[in-house]
Image (tube, grey):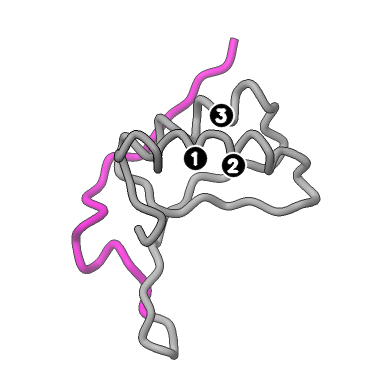
Amino acid sequence: EHIIQFVSFNMEAKEGYYTLNNGNKIPQIALGTWQSRDDDVEKAVVAAIDAGYRAIDTAPVYGNEPSIGKALKECFESGKVTREE
């Protein structure tokens, strides 16, 4: 059994972001996907987006990018989130 836990916080709060040297902002908290199985990570990404997450940690070495991409595409197409977010 796999349990997904999310930290509750306000993603819109100013303190919820780091400001980079170039002025861009990135969320302080991201969903980690390392060692996540395809079937689990797809559900986790959608749940994270629904919970307010706007950063997903991913890398080719994790081997689950296709499932993450599928989940993000679903979120974009449904209007839950925009690519720019």
**Which one is earlier in the sequence, the residue at label 3 or at label 1?**
3
Residue pointed to by mark 1: 73
Q: Which mark is residue 42?
A: 3
For marks 2 and 1, give the CA distance. 6 Å
The percent coordinates of residue 23 (x first, y second) are 36, 86
Residue 84: % across, % down: 37, 61
**Residue plotted at (40% across, 37% down):** 75
Look at label 1 and name its amino acid: Lys
Indicate the amino acid at tag 3: Glu
Front disc: 3 or 2: 2
Taking the spot 50% from the left edge, 30% from the top edge, the residue there is 44
Mark 3 and mark 2 lie on one chain; the one further toward the N terminus is 3
Dot 2 corresponds to which residue?
A: 69
Would you call the spot at circle 2 few (<14 residues within 10 Å), some (14-19), or many (20 or more)?
Answer: few
Along the viewing direction, whichever of 9 and 56 lies nearer the viewer: 56
Residue at 38% x, 79% y: name it: 24
Q: Which residues are magenta?
A: 1-19
> In 3D space, how far apart are the residues under numbered discs 3 and 1 (Cα atoms)?
11 Å
Kindly state the secondary structure of the residue where label 1 is placed.
helix
Q: Up-down: is 48 above or below 25? A: above
Q: Are marks 2 and 1 in contact (CB under 8 Å)?
A: yes
| Amino acid type of the residue tagged 2 in the rendering | Gly
Relative vertical location of residue 52 with respect to residue 74 in this rendering, above or below? below
Q: Quadrant location of the N terminus?
A: top right
